[in-house]
Amino acid sequence: MMDKMIFGRYIPGDSFVHLLDPRSKLIFVFAFIVVVFLANNAITYGLLLAFTLLVILTSRIRLYFLINGLKPIMILLVFTFLIHILFTREGDVVLDLGFLKVYEEGLRQGIFISIRFLVLVFMTSILTLTTSPISITDGIEVLLNPLKKVKLPVHELALMMSIALRFIPTLMDETDKIMKAQMARGSDLSAGSLKERLKAVVPLLVPLFVSAFKRAEDLATAMEVRGYRGGEGRTRYRQLKWDWRDTLSLVVLAAMTALLVFYRN
Amino acid sequence: MTEILSFQNVSFSYTPDQPDARKAVQDVSFSINEGEWIAMVGHNGSGKSTMVKLVSGLLFPQEGEVRVMRDVLTEENLWDIRSNIGMVFQNPDNQFVGATVQDDVAFSLENSGVPYKEMVERVHSSLVQVKMDKFLNHEPHHLSGGQKQRVAIAGALAMRPKLLILDEATSMLDPQGRDEVLRTVRALREEIGLTVLSITHDVEEALFADRILFMNDGKKYAEGTPSEIFALGDKLEEFGLELPFAMRMTKLFQEKGVPLAGQHMTEDELVNDLWTSSFSK
């Protein structure tokens, strides 16, 4: 289950999309999320779907892999589709099963909403699949930089995020170790009632918290000794480079938006 | 010879408002000259860790002076002095700040505002020095403990420090990782004449040092070359410190009546003496 789940996973590669600057990708995805709402008829939704397929193709992530990985989310999609079919009562009746009448408008709405949903999920997945978490953090830091003027601690937030990301595997290993240690002492995490199982989690969490705080303290000392004094006067080792690809992708998105505006009702 | 670090009658107590309480560090004086390797040994609670905190300015002494590069360490020059000291701590995981090897090495450079181009050069050259240049983009959880410690050394080297402090840097590593790290430090000393202060309770590590500071109960109990210190023999064991393997072996041989000439600190010496001992009868 966890292996197939692709939400928030990063797959290294060297496709056009992989090589894009995280800033342009972030702007692209956020603009796209807004643009999606321009679509309101068959042509425009068709355009959106085609456009998304194009992006998936350029990212060289296999469609099968993408669909397979997003299966849990597909359930949600089917659910919204059914809700629309069942509860929208406008237009002609397309299908009459006696106890259930499917209206034209319901079908139309259901399909449109599903496409919208699908396109959004695909696009955001492509973003996280082709960009390493640390690059996303970099991109967010730079994009939020103007907010420093209103005293938002942008650098600190970005550093917190990158340290959190860096410690996920470490703490996962630690959890695993503690779990095995507690199991060796006879704790059973997989049997019993819900209450019993929740109780068994406590001896797991306490040592994990203790060690996480210890780690945080050590890390703070190490950072201080290595001269960390906040964002002031710091240079950046990770440089972001905006090149023709980034401009091109935003131009393409703008063209897409123009097409949507032109063809929408 | 240039003096890199010196302690002059330094005392420190974690509870200064209780004058009767035992001080963590009591009236300690010593100095380290450029190019030396000093090992500070002592059992838990002997004041070793407090000494490290005093050197790096995480704590300030209540009495006496800590001088780094002949400047007295104060709140004002703290950050300048820190940029001259590289430190490697005990837990390899808890000092890895960056997301990848190269980010981590660059961390202290970023902090002191080194321009990008120079940063790239320094990161690469210091990773070459510890032979980790093939791991530029590796994430910490794909590295072994020894490799992580070598990255930490590279991070310190990138700042071109005058003094490298190893604070129990090998105590959490397997024997292989320990050898890796110690070999790296020794090679660095030969290449760039780095001054090293290693805090350890591993006597085999202390054997590499030019001088050993033996701490006990917050005081400097003895100071001298490894052979001088280990000549104290039983006294060390009394304070909870194990003798090097070769020395313990020699002692056992002598108890069994094998005629061996004096003390042997390394296995090679011992082996040499053993196979020649029957000839010299």
Image: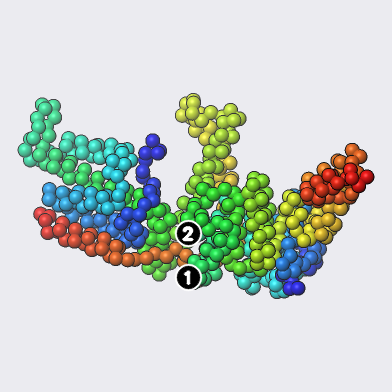
Closer to us: A166 or B146: B146
Give how far apart the Cα atoms at labels 2 and 1 are.
22 Å
Asked where in the image residue A256 lies, by quadrant, the reply is bottom left
Residue at 38%, 60% in the rendered image: A140
- Residue A211, label in figure: none
* Residue contact between numbered discs 2 and 1, judged by CB atoms under 8 Å: no
Q: Which residue is mark 1?
A: B117
Q: Position of residue B5 (x, y in %)?
A: 73, 68
Name the outermost residue toward the right.
Answer: B281
Residue linked to disc 2: A159
Q: In this rendering, is residue A236 above or below A68?
A: below
Q: Is residue A93 above or below residue B154?
A: above
- Look at the numbered disc 2 and give the secondary structure of its residue: helix
| Residue A263 coordinates in the image, percent (x, y) | 11, 56
Q: Residues within 10 Å of mark 2 (few under 14, many from 20)?
A: some
Q: Position of residue B216 (x, y in %)?
A: 81, 54
Residue B78 in view: no
Task: Report the number of numbered marks.
Answer: 2
Kind of residue sitting beneath label 2: Leu
The quadrant of the image that shows the C terminus of chain B is top right
